[in-house]
Amino acid sequence: QVQLVESGGGLVQAGGSLRLSCAASGSIFSFNAMGWYRQAPGKQREFVASITVGGSTNYLDSVKGRFTISMDNAKNTVSLQMNSLKPEDTAVYYCKLYPYSYWGQGTQVTVSS
């Protein structure tokens, strides 16, 4: 099994910043990328950002230029620096370890207007 533990969420005003972190542990034999997803109330979970072990990144269009994903391969951790936050960024954020299908408990991000 693989365990994913997200942290760093909280309540912030619009325009503020948060940094999310996720640590992966357990039966990790190899992985090729890590990523972040989010799920707002009443909506489906959506992709936010990903980064490969080679450093290639991909972002949801609405977060480009505001969010930055980074990964420490040796420590199996991934971070998401979120700047210029907007109320529509409010959601529970989950990290993902590719190609595994496990999810963590998520961390709540709430952006007030």
Image (tube, rainbow, N blue to C red):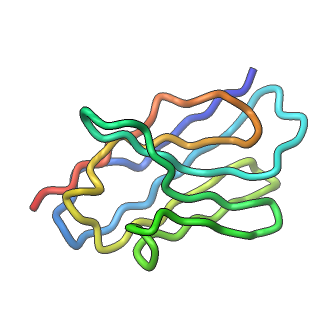
Number of marks present in the image shown: 0
Foreground: 64 or 81? 64
Which residue does the image show at 72% across and 27% down from the upper left?
A: 2
16 is higher (above) or lower (below) than 65: above
Query: Which residue occupies 82% across, 44% down?
Result: 31
Q: Quadrant of residue 78?
A: bottom right
Residue 24, above or below 65: above
Q: Position of residue 5 (x, y in %)?
A: 56, 35
Q: Which residue is most to the bottom?
A: 65
x, y percentage for residue 40?
30, 41
Q: Position of residue 62 (x, y in %)?
A: 38, 67
Instruction: Name, please, the residue furthest toward the left.
Output: 113
In the displayed image of the protein, which residue is found farthest to the top?
Answer: 1
Query: In the rendered image, which quarter contains the N terminus?
Result: top right
Q: Position of residue 87 (x, y in %)?
A: 19, 58
The residue closer to the viewer here, 21 or 89, is 89
Between 43 and 30, the residue placed more toward the observer is: 43
Task: Report which quarter residue 113 is drawn in.
Answer: bottom left
Taking 105 as reference, is 56 left or right?
Answer: right
Q: In percent of the image, x 43 and y 38: which residue is there? A: 45
Quarter assignment of residue 100: top right
